[in-house]
Amino acid sequence: MEKTKKTNPTIRFFKRLKSFHFSRSHYALPYLIMLAVLVMLPLGMMIFNSFRHDIYGHFTLFNYRQFFRTAGNWQAMWRSLYTAAIVTVACLILAYPVAFILSNPKFNRSTTIIFAFALPMWVNIMLRTIALRNLFFLMGIDLGYPTVVIGLIYDFFPFMLLPLYTSLSSIDRSYVEAGSDLGAGAVRNFSKITLPLSVPGIVSGSILIFMATVSNFAIADLLGSDIIMFGNVVNLLFRNRRLTGNVGSAFATILLVIIVASMLATSRLTRKKGGGTQGGGRL
Amino acid sequence: MAKKNVTQEKKETIIEIKNIIKKFGDVTILDDVNLSIKRGDFVTLLGPSGCGKTTLLRLIAGFDTPTDGAIFIGGNNVTMLPPHKRPVNTVFQKYALFPHLNVFGNIAFGLKLAKIPDTSKPAGKNGKIPTRKWKKAEIKEKVEKALTLVGLEGYGHRDTNSLSGGQQQRVAIARAIVCEPKVLLLDEPLGALDLKMRKEMQVELMNMHRNLGITFVYVTHDQEEALTMSDKIAVMRDGVIQQLGTPKQIYDEPQNAFVADFIGESNILSGTMIKDFVLEFAGAKFTCEDKGFGKGENVDIVIRPEDIYIMDADNPKGMLKGEVVSVIFKGTYYEIEVKNEGYQFTVQDTASWDVGDKVTMYIRPHDIHVMKKAKTINSFDGVIKGADSVQFLGATYEIAEQADFEAGDEVTVKIEFDNVELTDHPEDAPLSGRVTDTLYKGKYYQVQVYVEDADEFFLLNTNVEWDNGDQVGILVKAEDIQLEKRTDSTETAD
């Protein structure tokens, strides 16, 4: 006599639930949901809207054409790009020597000092900027383009310092010793070994700062009396959402394309150079 | 051209190390090291980890500067010279190949920086020889030659990360020798390789040394490697060179029990010299080939396992009766443990015996190596604290009531090796330290304990086996502490 193998569906469900195990890939689920809802969805909406006319709602390239119609738009875009470049380079020049000294155990034995350098990050960026603005007033400095650049450098400096520090302090001492063993003095040792090995830190710090600066408008708002960055243009278009929101979407998309393109270009450049196997917070 | 001079230069000293002391903070790593290395020799610095061998190599390379003393290379004082100005190159333990350069770039690194005398230009007014850099084609040729030498032809374009450990090691060697240094320093270069690879590289390094004529200074903790490869071995321990000699000298005539124990397996025992050529150990009298010791002097005796012959118990030639307690087959020989009145001997024999066999052992006189004991008693400077306590090495110990001394008296404290006891609980003892060495002496273990706070060593005999690195407390019974009045050194001098 054969037994019937059929079991109750409820029991089967619980059996299956019992045999369900969390695999490592499941841990990424919460972030995946967040990514979908808060990043991919708005991004899709932005790109979708950028092709729609604000008033009539039909699909058009009108919004993109708007960008080239007024000289002020691409002037602001150009200003944002070169400002970001200036700020990035300035941060690099300021942060590199500091990171270099801090990463050398001969000069710095504790991580306390690196904390001190990262301390401004603990204060809200708006508070910091407003404080800086008051400082400028106090010193009698008129707000303008220079104050915007100074503010940006001041606000984003730690974002350059930390990746540089991680990158530099992860360079094995034996490389430097090998360099001097093979005949390189201090200067050559730096230019031929330390500098190339810290490229990953330079790249990630630069990308962080460039991206944050190129789209920034709040600091220009607070520290530049009439300096218009591209971020300010987009901001203004969104303020007037019902009439120009979709134009703003198109402008933001243009900026996005430029950032993604420049990032791809730099990552390809560094990969060709062969560096980057060393640790150091590569993006 | 250089070959012709080799025999002539062979006797010349290339590296002279004079009274080198190196301290990191309060810890002494090298304690008054003297060493001279002849041109063209393959010299190995051999010792257990922490003996200071790598530190000595780093001082020669210039990565560290000594606390005191001087280093000469080729007759020039280089003590304070930075590494890039020294005529030496290093092969690093973990290769240290530059990750941002390919194989070619790594090997060419030193050549691109080098300046060589330019013979095409006339000498400058002040006698300065004009210099030039290597031309691109010359560099290419040299790198390819170096790659061929290490057996990596055609690997120039490869990324260093794509190479196996052995190949990376070859690149590291090529990178160092391509600069044609006067001395090649090698810091445990084969440590990360598997056994088969290591054996291959040993032979290749020896061939390279022969063909290049460069002086090699080689650091290793592997005694077999040292014995195979070197012309000379410097055995180091606790920052001091224990013995410098050819591999044969080191093996056959170890200067002390440590060297004997470190180089190969050996039976180490304590014995007494009865008179010249006669000594006593393990309860029997032996003839030996050593003289010049004091009558009744306690000595260390070393007998290699292959120098003991096992025979049937009734053989009249036998010197020591015993019983076989274990037999292990080791491929080409048997390792046999023979027990005799508490003493245990390790013997290597091609014939097998059974456990429980009653046997007798025979040792030839010239196979008995007699050595002076480095230390026969623990002796420290101390101060009497009161009627029942004395302070030495920063700790206070109880002593038996002493009428001869008053508090504040300066004394010499002496403690026999047999009268020291160790405990697992350092907090229970006045003094604590770390076990740095244990030596099996046939019947007991001789243990060396390092007392860090005082930078002194305690020696003791015990039946308990301790491991190196164990933290222990040092206990001494009150009646076992011997005290002697300390007189000024000027008075004791005569």
Image (tube, coloured by chain):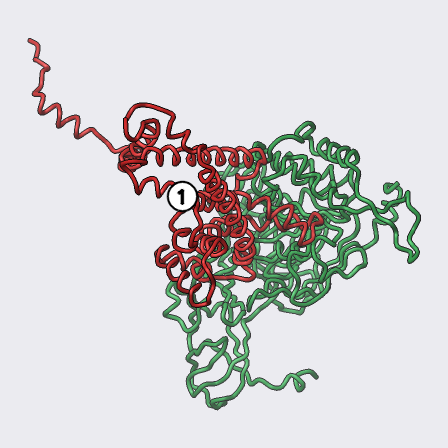
| Residue that appears at 41% across and 35% down | A256
Mark 1 burial class by Cα count in 10 Å: few <14, some 14-19, many 20+? many
The chain letter of the green chain reads B
Q: Mark 1 — residue? A: A231
Check the image and name the residue furthest to the top: A1
The vertical placement of B381 against A139, above or below, is below
Q: Is A241 displayed left or right of A210 in the figure?
A: left
**Viewer-side residue, A160 vs B140:** A160
- Kind of residue at disc 1: Gly
Residue B362 appears in the picture as rendered: no
Q: Is residue A78 left or right of A194 when viewed as pictured?
A: left
Measuring 43% from the left and 36% from the top, which residue is drawn there? A255
Tell me: residue B86, above or below residue A84: below
Q: Position of residue B201 (x, y in %)?
A: 65, 36
- For the point 50% across and 52% down, the residue is A165
Question: Is residue B399 among the parts visible in the rendering?
Answer: yes
